[in-house]
Image (cartoon, rainbow, N blue to C red):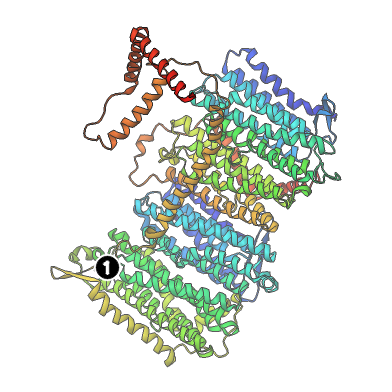
Amino acid sequence: MMLLLLTAGPMAGAALSYLIGRKSRTARDFFADVLVIAEFLLFLVLGMNVLAGDVLTYRLPGFCMRGLSFKMDGFRFLYGTIAAFMWMMTTIFSEEYFAHYRNRNRYYLFMLVTLGATVGVFLSADLFTTFLFFEIMSFTSYVWVAHDEKKESLRAAQTYLAVAVIGGMVMLMGLFLLNDAVGTLDMDSLFEACRACPDKGILYAAGGCMLFGFGAKAGMFPLHIWLPKAHPVAPAPASALLSGILTKSGVFGVIVVSCNIFLHDAVWGFTVLLFGVVTMFIGAFLAVFSVNLKYTLACSSMSQIGFILVGIGMQGLLGEENALAVRGTVLHMVNHSLIKLVLFMAAGVVFFNLHKLDLNEVRGFGRKKPLLKLSFLAGALSISGVPLFSGYVSKTLLHESIVEFTAYGGVQATAFMKGVEYVFLFTGGLTAAYMMKLFVAVFVEENEDQKSMDASNGRYMNRRTAFALVGSAVVLAVLGVVPSLTMDFVADISQGFMHGTSPHESVRYFSITNLSGAAVSILTGIAVYFGFIRTCLMRKENGKKYYVNRLPKWFDLENLLYRPLLMRVLPFALAFVCRIFDKITDGIIWLIQKTVLREARAKEPLPYGNKLTHCISIVLNCMAKVMNHTIRRKRPIRVSFEKRTAQKYEEFITTTRLFEKSVSYGLLMFCIGLFVTLIYLLLSI
Amino acid sequence: MSPSLVVLPILFPLITGALLPLFRFRERKCRNIYVELVTLINSVMILILLYHHPGIAYRAINLAGNLEVTFKIDGLSCLFAGLIAFLWPFATLYAFEYMEHLGKENTFFAFYTMTFGVTTGIAFAGNLMTLYMFYEMLTLVTLPLVMAGMSREAILAGRKYVFYSIGGAAFAFIGFIFIFTYGNTMNFVPGGVLLGQSLGDKAGLLRLVYVLAVLGFGVKAAVFPFHGWLPAASIAPTPVTALLHAVAVVKAGAFAIIRITYYSYGTDFLRGTWAQYVILGFAAATILFGSARAVKEPHLKRRLAYSTVSNLSYIVFGAALMTPAGLAGGLSHMIFHAFIKITLFYCAGAVLVGTHRQYVRELDGLGKKMPVVFAAFTVGSLALTGIPGFPGFISKWNLCTAAVKEGNAMALTGIAALLISALLTAVYLFTTIIRAYYPGKDFDYAALDSVHDPGMLMKIPLTVFSLFIIVMGIYSVPLMQFLEKIASGWI
């Protein structure tokens, strides 16, 4: 029952907040704060039971036909709590951020509904419930992206909605296939049922559809297109949530599919791994080139999702021995959520002070703003995988899992996995490079107009905002400094969800081998930064250097392929076919009307001449037309032959009549008669 | 309860409707009260009849030989009659406010009331003869409604409507004759009337005739390529397009298809044969076609009409699966679509009356100015797209699970068509909503100052229907159980 309250509570509260908001803004803000804090506390209280070894379940039969079922075990508790935590922090943060926005009431309404839906996704115990909340979440978060109603926001929101709807439909297809093949959608019984299913082909088809649907939300290549567009245009608190938690709901789905339907399945693992590697690299690649603060962070999110997918893929490949991959996956999810919370809120602080995001324009804003600087630094170091910060731990685990497979796998596998390992480390390097780019740009370099940047020093954010930002940043440091206490605990409670077990020996995070992996990445990053970003991606002008985006404008999968395909080619083809068929029946009826059912028409007299002249004139007119277009183009014939032929005919008739009556006609006839007789005589002889 | 009472709700509106022009009402108000009273009384009569439904057939007239006009109320009748009895009084309320702007109300309401009786006749028909008779009558009584505007376009649309309908009925007539010749009885029997007959080499011919009959009735159900009349008929006043062309008339077509499939020719005879595949193919093609056309259609009411074309074939598709699960899915869509589409049309009508805007591109910014209308429109759109938590999703889920279970190639094609159509539905409805709610940052709301929500008579049906949609989405277990009982032939 409490589980239902966790999802329905915020939704009901959303409606209430809307009503309150119509009366008073401050009351609404206060109410929303109370609601999200209560949600977070409720999670903690229920979590006590879960940690004591209890598993909470709740079923609501009949709701939307199949009924809902919720469950709270370690992993679900963990992610629900993180969701509640992020909502709490962003809601506290929102008050100052939205101070000058319109339509705030609408934002709060949909923000709270989405909270309920997201919690619903993470607590769901069967895929039907997951799907239901997943769709609600997709639709309500649309409003976030479109919030400021600018042209590019509406466009990004359109993309977001399109990807969400298409993903949802494909996922639904997967659910139908799965439900038919194994007869259940319950996550706990799915594992056994799929093991018993003889037809693996249909399972792969179902799994593929679901990977498409969940992957679209997670931002997996090639369905990532919405992500770099939507995050920058959404308000910063919403970007933090979109990036930190909504993408994770997609990952949650991928995990459910991977760890129940395809547990320890190498083929599946390999597929996910491939997608993961591509997503990871492309995200980082785009981020390096970007010159927009939030766009960089969005691409970074995509890249980090790639890392997580690599972890999920490795779980499948490693089979029974996947402890490291399981723990790495969970921890990287957690870390990325929390890191992006801090980074996007920091970007939000920059934005609500300057209303700009371009690196050349916000450059130097962060100088002499220690709180902002330190918070951002914590996030940046953590995501780059610097030891003593949380990101280091999870990246190390993921890296170790790849190394482990290389050690155990065959010769071919080794060559391939070496490649994956290099890409992994190189992408880690790129991460360090683009974070360094952001940090140097915002916090180190000086702006041309540094005075106006420094003008707001000391009062650029109020206490609530500072609390949200710094509070979230502290968590990162705490997690990273004592990983064997915090991180191991997090991993221990959640690995059961992925059918994982604890590793045989506890991992020594700060051993030399592990530190050297991080060192390789970070050194690569520094090399990329100084060797590529500061040289190739900057342009010198009047003695100052500017950031420029060297990627060509057309380099965009959405504009290059998806939009033309979906908005031009397909509709055209469909409409063409449709129009033809649309006319068929009408055409038949028209034909019948014109032929069989035609009303007899009274004959209209021809204007000139008779039928014969009419026909001849038509032929002549046609010939004249053809000639006008070809040989007589210079001197076209401009006469209508209708009248002329009629006249000629008339003349012809009168002259014949006259002629008939004349003597010469009689003589002519006589001659012909004679001639015929002569021939007859000649022939008969 | 005497079985002869069945004819009451059929004759009552026919007679009162025909008398309406004779009363020469001085005031609009009196006439409205009269019409609303008639509709209400009739609805109540129908509901009472459904509640105590006499299980035996009532033979009203014997035309010739064994051609009888027979009425019987079974589960399927309950469903259809219940649906229209519920919708009609609300729809009439809406019509009052709407028709004020159009004039010629007396004729309009006369035929409008008579249509109620004829539709009830279709629902209560106990054999194919009766069904066919009322089916033809339906064409005739609704024709003046389509042409109510009496503009050139309206008359052309009316002609088209008659052409298509009469043509379709001719094909249906063939199907009727063959059942008359080969069936055990003319009456509707769950499982069909061809059981126990040694058909021999006539089986192939009968299947062909079945396909012709379905396509013939399919004209009213707007099965592609016989859908042309429906978008053209959206020229009619909104109460007509909403109630008749989204619910009563088109659903009568689907209803007749279900009748001849399940109650005359019988699923045992048809299932797994080419006849089934052909019908499934037509349905799948229509599903795709309707939504694809709707996406490209800029005129709001025509867009909704194309959407109706697509959605009716969901029902036909469910019926053509020829399993109880499939039929239950189709019937659930019949109910849900009725409510959803009537809501959407009413919203379009409210916009049309309030602002004289007919095209989707003109809807910018109306979301804020007509909150009730667009809230209802949003609910309807979400439901029709099949967002989980709304009724459209339930029927889609039922149809698809039934089709997956059926497992043949045509059924799987149908699922693909359903899902793609759902996607297209999202496109053509959401673009509308997004326009209304997000006109863009620099939109000038001052130009819309005179725009506001319509009056109470329009708002009541909108609110009631939207609420019903929401409730059905959340909890529909009893309804689904009822539908499964009907589909299995238990009631």
User: Disc 1 sits on a residue from what chain?
Assistant: A
The image shows residue B338, relative to residue A678, as above or below, that is below
The image shows residue A673, relative to residue A463, as above or below, that is above
Residue A181 locus on image (x, y percent)? 68, 65
Residue A389 in sight from this viewpoint: no
For label 1, the crowd category at 10 Å Cα-Cα, with few meaning under 14, some 14 to 19 and many 20 or more, is few
Residue A71 locus on image (x, y percent)? 63, 67
The image shows residue A303, relative to residue B370, as above or below, that is below
Residue at position x 69%, y 30% in the image: B135
Drawn side of residue B54 relative to residue A640, left or right? right
Quarter-of-image position of residue A234: bottom left
Of all residues, the one furthest to the bottom in this rendering is A512
Drawn side of residue A223 relative to residue B253, left or right? left
Q: In the picture, which quadrant includes the C terminus of chain B?
A: top right
Q: In the picture, which quadrant includes the N terminus of chain B?
A: top right
Residue B211 locus on image (x, y percent)? 69, 42
Badge count: 1
Callout 1 amino acid: Arg
Residue at position x 39%, y 13% in the image: A669
Residue at position x 49%, y 54% in the image: A140
Secondary structure of the residue carrying tag 1 is loop
Residue A423 in sight from this viewpoint: yes
